[in-house]
Image (cartoon, grey):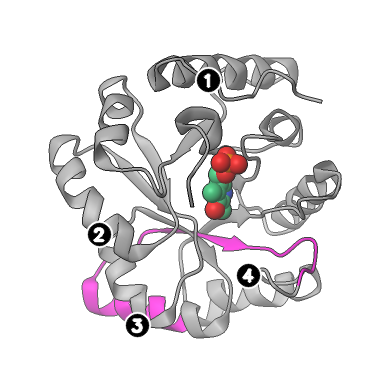
């Protein structure tokens, strides 16, 4: 089990960033991959711009947010200062927020149902551009969680690609909190392999080293960088 991925209380958050990046590089090399094979998505949800800015100053350029409205309040200004920043949508996407999300985010990781896929395709035709898309798989078949169930994944991926011609580049999952995550990471990797999808967004603060061993290309870390969230 990873023991080194804890938030370091009392340290500057930029120190946490450095530590986490070293651990990601080490885990990548340990699983026979290049040290830069895995990209870090710094999950800044609930944290204010004043907390995010030092992380940008330290060089981090990929961030994750889970709410369109919150991202719209923080990121246009931050992106104006750091234009090469890439913002990932990692939260539940309401179909009436799709256009807003597509103008704010560079990657949407949570495409999970035909209604949203159709809304994205329509907006893409209108806007003339589309973020990179990942499909969220509910690997644990948890009713309260978003994501396509594994048994429906093949059909939904095919529908996104063929019917809507969407730029699907990978898959994302959030394993059940109480289960061994490796089974879920392995399942996500297997579905991606079947469809020749390159991106695998899996692994959070508590399990990212395991996710990297299972082929994650993106790990999404909030607590390990920014500390505990109040809400
Ligand atoms: C909040 C969140 C994360 C980050 O979780 P930590 O445990 O704080 O690293 C990752 N992915 C998603 C989808 C999230 O909502």
> Residue 162 versus residue 60: which sits nearer the camera?
60
Q: Is the shortest distance between ligand 1 and the CB of mark 3 under 8 Å? A: no
Residue at x 50%, y 85% (from the top left corner) = 115
Sequence-first disc among 1 and 4: 1
Considering only order in the chain, which callout, 4 or 3, is on the residue closer to the N terminus? Answer: 3
| Above/below status of 190 relative to 155 | above
- What distance separates the C-alpha of mark 3 from that of mark 2? 21 Å
Q: How far apart are marks 2 and 4 (CA)?
A: 22 Å
Nearest-to-viewer mark from 1 and 4: 1
Q: What stretch of residues is rendered in magenta?
A: 118-142
Q: Where is residue 56 in the image (x, y as percent from the top left)?
A: 28, 28
Q: Residue sitting at 36 percent across and 59 percent down? A: 131
User: Residue at coordinates 25% horizontally, 59% vertically from top-left?
Assistant: 72
| Residue 146 numbered mark, or none | 4
Give the residue at mark 2.
Answer: 72
Q: Quadrant of residue 24?
A: top right
First of labels 3, 1 by sequence position: 1
Q: Is residue 123 magenta?
A: yes
Residue under pointer 1: 9
Disc 3 to disc 1, C-alpha distance: 46 Å
**Numbered label attached to residue 122:** 3
Q: In this view, does 177 lie to the left or right of 111?
A: right
Residue 206 at x, y percent in the picture: 69, 35
């Amino acid at each position: 089990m990873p023991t080194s991925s804890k938030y370091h209380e009392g340290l500057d958050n930029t120190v946490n960033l450095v530590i986490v990046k070293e651990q990601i590089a080490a885990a990548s090399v340990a699983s026979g991959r290049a040290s830069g094979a895995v990209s870090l998505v710094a999950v800044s949800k609930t944290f204010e711009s004043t907390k995010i800015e030092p992380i940008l100053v330290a060089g981090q350029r990929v961030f994750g947010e889970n709410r369109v409205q919150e991202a719209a309040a923080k990121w246009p200004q931050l992106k104006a200062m750091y234009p090469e920043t890439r913002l990932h949508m990692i939260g539940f996407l309401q179909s009436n927020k799709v256009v807003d999300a597509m103008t704010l985010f560079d990657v949407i990781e949570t495409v999970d149902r035909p209604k949203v896929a159709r809304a994205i395709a329509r907006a893409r035709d209108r806007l003339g551009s589309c973020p990179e898309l990942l499909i969220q798989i509910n690997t644990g078949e948890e009713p309260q969680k978003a994501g396509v169930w594994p048994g429906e994944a093949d059909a939904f991926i095919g529908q996104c690609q063929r019917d809507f011609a969407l730029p699907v580049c990978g898959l994302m999952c959030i394993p059940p909190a109480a289960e061994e995550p490796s089974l879920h990471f392995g399942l996500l990797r297997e579905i991606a392999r079947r469809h020749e999808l390159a991106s695998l967004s899996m692994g959070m603060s508590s399990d990212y080293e395991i996710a990297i061993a299972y082929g994650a290309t993106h790990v999404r870390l909030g607590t390990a960088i920014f500390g505990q969230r109040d809400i």
